Image: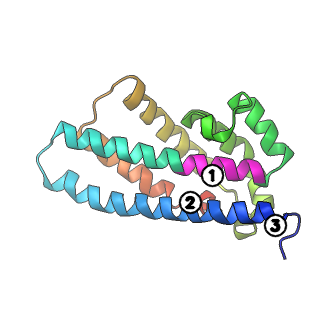
Amino acid sequence: MFRGYSTIIFLVLVAWMHDLKSLREELLLSVARWQPEMSNSAPRSTLQYGIAQKCYTLLDRILAVCTAEAITLTGSSGEEACRSCGGGKPPSRMTLGERVQVLEKLDSELSKVLPQIRGTRALGKSGIRLLHSISKSRNQFIHDRVGMDEHQVASVLRQATEFCKLSLLSM
């Protein structure tokens, strides 16, 4: 039934899938709650900062789960991607940008090992562009202290919604 997987690996994957599903649902519910707040209220920088911070945190947590799962599922290819993109660090210690690079490197491999997306890419070109865009805007927000106005926060929320539609999250 689960060819190539030991019982322990299968149980770990089931736990990851549950985490991934609950994190994805939390992000979608939060986005649905935050979007009206951005359009219906007067701009408040603390509100905008808080929404952006929480959104990026959830995106990073989801990518951490996806990266760990992708590395496990793809075996030696995943280990090589971990070494080349993350300097050999475990996925839990990687930066968001390193996780994006690992997932980009494993995109075609994932379609071979995930029966639910067989025949399609986990990310594809548009998904890879989206992840790089999220990484870039998150880095500007966190590291460069770029302020977020209501339009930029709305853009982050749109990106989060698009992210939740990626085949990658069907793992």
**Tag nearer the camera, 3 or 1:** 3
The residues colored magenta run 62-72
Q: Give the residue at x 34% y 58%.
A: 30
Q: Quadrant of the N terminus?
A: bottom right
**Which is nearer the N-term, disc 3 or disc 2?**
3
Q: Nearer the viewer, mark 3 or mark 2?
A: 3
Residue 26 coordinates in the image, percent (x, y): 42, 61
- The reply to whether residue 170 is visible in this rendering is no
Q: Position of residue 92 (x, y in %)?
A: 61, 40
Query: Is disc 1 placed on a helix, strand or loop?
Result: helix
How dense is the environment of label 2, judged by Cα within 10 Å: few (below 14), some, or many (20 and up)?
many
User: Disc 3 or 1, which lies upstream in sequence?
Assistant: 3
Disc 3 crowd, CA 10 A, few/some/many (<14, 14-19, 20+): few
For residue 101, side relative to residue 77 (left or right): left
Return the residue at label 1.
66
Assign a secondary structure to mark 2: helix
The amino acid type found where label 2 is placed reads Leu
